[in-house]
Image (cartoon, helix red, strand yellow):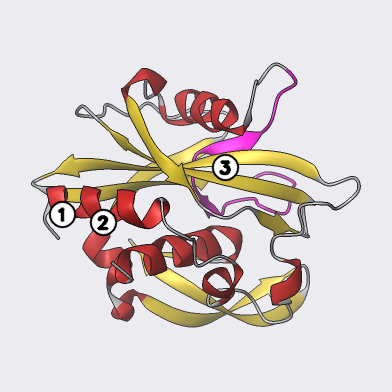
Amino acid sequence: MDFQLFKHNLYTGLNSPLPGAPAQHLMAPAGRNISDLQAENLVGAKTAAVLALFYEQNSTAHLVLTLRKSYKGVHSNQISFPGGKRDKTDVDYLQTALREAEEEIGISSTNVDVYGQLSPLYIPPSNFLVHPFVGIYNSKPHFTKQESEVEEIFSVTVDELLDDSFITNVTLNLRGVNMEVPTFLFKGYNVWGATAMMLSELRQILLLQ
């Protein structure tokens, strides 16, 4: 997809009614109820924000993804957007997303044109309500990973995101239980769970234009 057309479609889609939970649920693991995906009023839920960041390369839109470090936690060694927990000093969720992106992939938030926001998504295993933002980097990015949290930074093209052949199902051992989950297969990595569900809504936004 031509980059200028992509930018137009992205802006139009993000500033129209969002497809929301039904689009997220297309890539949800078995057992996730569509009614609890955007449970924004949960008592005790922690809050976080992430940034789906695109940039232009060879006249094509590329989307940044990260591989998390291995650690003792439910999201160890998973593919994610740059982002993290909201700090008390963050004025809003957008500041959280931009600050975390600066820290994790080394970009300058002043070079991010924010186009809009995806639907919030609740993640039961970590009890986080995540607010995803979408932006375009307006210069050539030079990524520097945060060694303590990021194992690898890579990207996929918008054409790969929209291509059905990159969607499959795999069986993963999740907390001791084998479960079949829908995934995007990008660069040899299974992108599943919350990130896949956010990608699913982003994908539907672009397909509907």
Q: Provide the residue span drawn in magenta.
A: 71-88
**Mark identifier at residue 69:** 3
Identified at 59% across, 74% down, the residue is 25
**Mark identifier at residue 5:** 1
Between tags 3 and 2, which lies in front? 2
Between tags 1 and 3, which lies in front? 1
Residues marked 2 and 1 touching at CB (< 8 Å):
yes
Q: CA distance from mark 2 to mark 1?
A: 6 Å
Quadrant where the N terminus lies? bottom left
Residues marked 3 and 2 touching at CB (< 8 Å):
no
Q: Secondary structure at mark 1?
A: helix
> 67 or 162, which lies in front?
162
Tell which circle, 3 or 2, labels the residue nearer the N-terminal end: 2
| Residue 10 visible in the picture | yes
Whole-percent x, y for residue 175 in the image = 77, 67
Quadrant where the C terminus lies? bottom left
Whole-percent x, y for residue 7 in the image = 23, 48
Q: Secondary structure at mark 2?
A: helix
Identified at 56% across, 65% down, the residue is 20
Q: Secondary structure at mark 3?
A: loop
Q: Amino acid under label 1?
A: Leu
Tell which circle, 1 or 3, labels the residue nearer the N-terminal end: 1
Residues marked 1 and 3 touching at CB (< 8 Å):
no
Left or right, residue 11 beside residue 94? left
Q: Amino acid under label 3?
A: Lys
Q: Amino acid under label 2?
A: Asn
